[in-house]
Image (cartoon, rainbow, N blue to C red):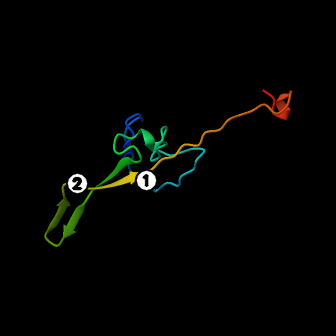
Amino acid sequence: MTFNPGDPAGPGSVTCSGEAPLGAYIAAAPGACSYTYRNESSTSPHDGYHFMTSLTTEWVVSWSGSTGGGQLEPLRTTSQEAVAVAAIKALVTCTGPRPEQGGC
């Protein structure tokens, strides 16, 4: 499985195989099939609002029957989706003179 996030400033595509695509997403420890956007989609060259993503899955297909069997050429399916990514910005202010009171 290959995911192209459509983010030209990102690290590129994410590829994973085997059991990795079936793993649960855990934010504290993203797995091999995870992608974290570093930019909001307002930076997108697509339309300035969305990243144009694509997901390609490669299937391994084999067959068997009474007259034999074998493996077919890999089958690839691809889908595309426009994805909006927002960013949340925060401002830290000092609220007290000591660190335990929120001081800086």
Residue identified by numbered label 2: 74
Residue identified by numbered label 1: 21
Q: Regarding mark 1 in the picture, which secondary structure is present there?
A: helix
| 101 up-or-down from 15: above or below | above
The three-letter amino acid code for the residue at tag 1 is: Pro
Q: Position of residue 8 (x, y in %)?
A: 37, 36
| 73 up-or-down from 8: above or below | below
Residue closer to the observer: 40 or 18 = 40
Instruction: Tell me the quarter of the picture where residue 44 sits.
Output: top left
Q: Residue at x 19, y 58 (%)?
A: 72
Residue 71 in sight in this render: yes
Residue closer to the observer: 31 or 9 = 9
Q: Position of residue 55 (x, y in %)?
A: 34, 52
Contact? badges 2 and 1 (CB < 8 Å): no
> Would residue 39 be found to the left or right of residue 56 on screen?
right
Tell which residue pokes out farthest to the bottom in this image. Answer: 66
Q: Residue at x 39, y 40 (%)?
A: 7
Q: Which mark is residue 9?
A: none
Q: Quadrant of the C terminus?
A: top right
Residue 2 in sight in this render: no
> Would residue 90 be found to the left or right of residue 19 on screen?
right
